[in-house]
Image (cartoon, helix red, strand yellow):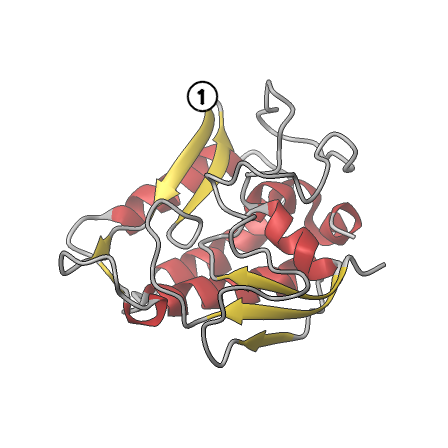
Amino acid sequence: MALFGQCVLTAAYLPPVDWFRAAARSGKVLIEQHELYQKQSFRSRCIILTSQGPETLSIPVLRDGTHKIPIRDIRIDYSEPWVLKHKRALDAAYNSSAFWEYYKDEIFGVLDSRKEFLFDLDMDLTTMLLRMTGIRAEMEFTEEFLPSYPDGDLRAAIQPKYRGEAIFNAKKEKAWFQVFPSSSGDISGLSVIDLLCSEGPNSTEFLL
């Protein structure tokens, strides 16, 4: 059953579970491509669950000293070995999970592609993960920036620093087996990688 006729989402790096819940429960997904880049957001970071608890993986980007850069124009900084760091972190967190070995090579292949622009890397990974989770979402891109939408505007809501009313009640959502269970029980901010590695083809059941 659809939650929204349409949901509006930002691009995200290995997006969180709630991003995919919104996509799975909506008639159409509209991806914002004309906003100004916002640092410390899911646009360039994700959260995975490790033996030490939640770990944030961030993609370094090239900046010219101004914050007013369109998301489409943000370039990735490869001067530091972040790809290797992220691959090692993902491997350490999920190599003992049931399905990591089936997805690892394809995920790493996209990470190794050295995309110039952050938006392109985000969308390549997201498109791949939509397929892996079995979500058949009609996906389009914004034609211009609008400050708000009358229905399903989740651009600000699915972000690390969001403090408003929860879109989904994590305690009521079906939980999946985790290699390293969260002590708080809050799984809403975790990358969908966590779900995918544990449930594989059954991931859709936890999103609809």
Q: Position of residue 121 (x, y in %)?
A: 39, 65
Q: Residue 114 falls in which quadrant of the image? A: bottom left
Q: How many marks?
A: 1
Q: Residue 64 falls in which quadrant of the image? A: bottom left
Please give the residue where the numbered disc 1 appears in the rendered image.
52
Q: Is residue 133 above or below residue 159?
A: below
Q: Position of residue 76 (x, y in %)?
A: 26, 60
> Which quadrant would the N terminus be assigned to in this image?
bottom right
Which residue lies most toward the bottom here?
143
Instruction: Name the element at disc 1.
Output: loop
Q: Residue at x 68, y 49 (%)?
A: 200
Q: Residue at x 73, y 36 (%)?
A: 169
Instruction: Give the left or right position of residue 17, taking residue 69 as reference.
Output: right
Viewer-nearest residue: 63 or 104: 63
Q: Which amino acid does the dot numbered 1 rest on?
A: Gln
Instruction: Give the left or right position of residue 160, taking residue 71 as reference.
Output: right
Q: Is residue 121 above or below residue 46?
A: below
Instruction: Give the left or right position of residue 12, taking residue 88 as reference.
Output: right
Instruction: Give the left or right position of residue 84, taking residue 191 as reference.
Output: left
Viewer-nearest residue: 187 or 2: 2
Q: Residue 166 falls in which quadrant of the image? A: top right
Q: Is residue 206 above or below residue 73?
A: above
Q: Position of residue 122 (x, y in %)?
A: 43, 62
Which residue lies most toward the top here?
183
Crowd tier of the residue under label 1, counting other residues whose Cα lies within 10 Å: few below 14, some 14–19, many 20 or above: few
Q: Position of residue 62 (x, y in %)?
A: 19, 59
Q: Residue at x 45, y 72 (%)?
A: 145
Q: Residue at x 45, y 21 (%)?
A: 52
